[in-house]
Image (spheres, coloured by chain):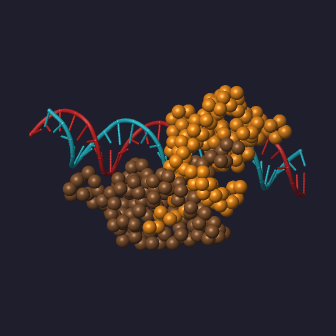
Chain colours: A orange, B brown, C red, D cyan
Amino acid sequence: MFLKGYLPYRLNLLAELTSEKTREIYRRRHDLTRPEWRVLVNLAEAPSLTASALCERVPAHKTKVSRALAALEQRGWVTRQTDPLDRRVSHAALTLKGKRAFNHIRPEMEAATEAMLAPLSAEERATVDAGLKVLERLFGQT
Amino acid sequence: MFLKGYLPYRLNLLAELTSEKTREIYRRRHDLTRPEWRVLVNLAEAPSLTASALCERVPAHKTKVSRALAALEQRGWVTRQTDPLDRRVSHAALTLKGKRAFNHIRPEMEAATEAMLAPLSAEERATVDAGLKVLERLFGQT
DNA sequence: GGATATTGGTTGAAAATGTAACTATCAACG
DNA sequence: CGTTGATAGTTACATTTTCAACCAATATCC
């Protein structure tokens, strides 16, 4: 059978399956799109980032980032201020409210992931990690 | 860093990266959406399938399958005929034209995947496969 | 046998995404 | 300077996807 052994298919399927539960959390429980969630995570990990920096880190196309930032700003989780030296760029950062939201959501996400992987032994997890690392190296996603 | 070690994120990212090239093929070169392509593959592997069977095998939500089938039928690659015993269900099958199209596209897809994985040694491929198998077993996608 | 619930599949409207064009600012070169 | 070209980010429009409602046919239960 062709499809079953076909790498992009296998990865897409597993990506969907593993995302199902966690998507439920950021989407239903917290009304965030995936780009919004990812932008939130990345902003939580850095004091402030420009839109283009977010594009690289998320990673996502600039329109997704632009819209995600607009939505998060709208919601009061993000503030932006334009760079005085180059007025094209603006630096986005989480507000206190945004940080609190992230600190609230993050453990839910981790718990969901952990619950999903609970049946796996340490050895199996290592196997998974090794396999993904090979691909990540291949694509330069160190 | 939270996101980098987070399984759904890693899988989604890799899925996107590996799909990039192959998507180019079914999309640009052959004007198929992903659900259409997947339905095509599954129909190529079975003499005929109902929409619900396709939903399970693709896998995808029934609206995606419904629309993919409609598009493929429109294009003359698929025929459907309603089951005489239960007139709600209809059996979809590839036409000769559909089979030919698939036989034309499939090697392109395989070549693209192979080209992408070319830098990997046999051992690395085995590592990848082992990792994915663990997850597939976890999710019952034997 | 007739009301009710279920199931297979389709459709329509709303949300999300992709693509391309656009604005505003800065850089570079004459 | 001033024209031309690049860059950061937004917006507009077409395509996809999602979600809920829907239709038609079958199954269930009284």
Residue B132 occupies quadrant: bottom right
Residue B92 appears at what percent x and percent y? 33, 61
As drawn, is B42 to the left or to the right of A16? left
Residue A78 appears at what percent x and percent y? 68, 32
Residue drawn 54% across the image and 42% down it? A115
Residue A130 visible in the picture: yes
Residue drawn 29% across the image and 56% down it? B90
**Nearer-the-camera pick, B129 or C10:** B129
As drawn, is B142 to the left or to the right of A78? left
Q: Up-down: is B75 above or below B55? A: below
Q: Up-down: is A52 above or below B131? A: above
Residue drawn 23% across the image and 53% down it? B87
**Nearer-the-camera pick, A98 or A66:** A98
- In the picture, the quarter occupied by the N terminus of chain A is bottom left
Residue A19 visible in the picture: no
Residue D13 appears at what percent x and percent y? 54, 46
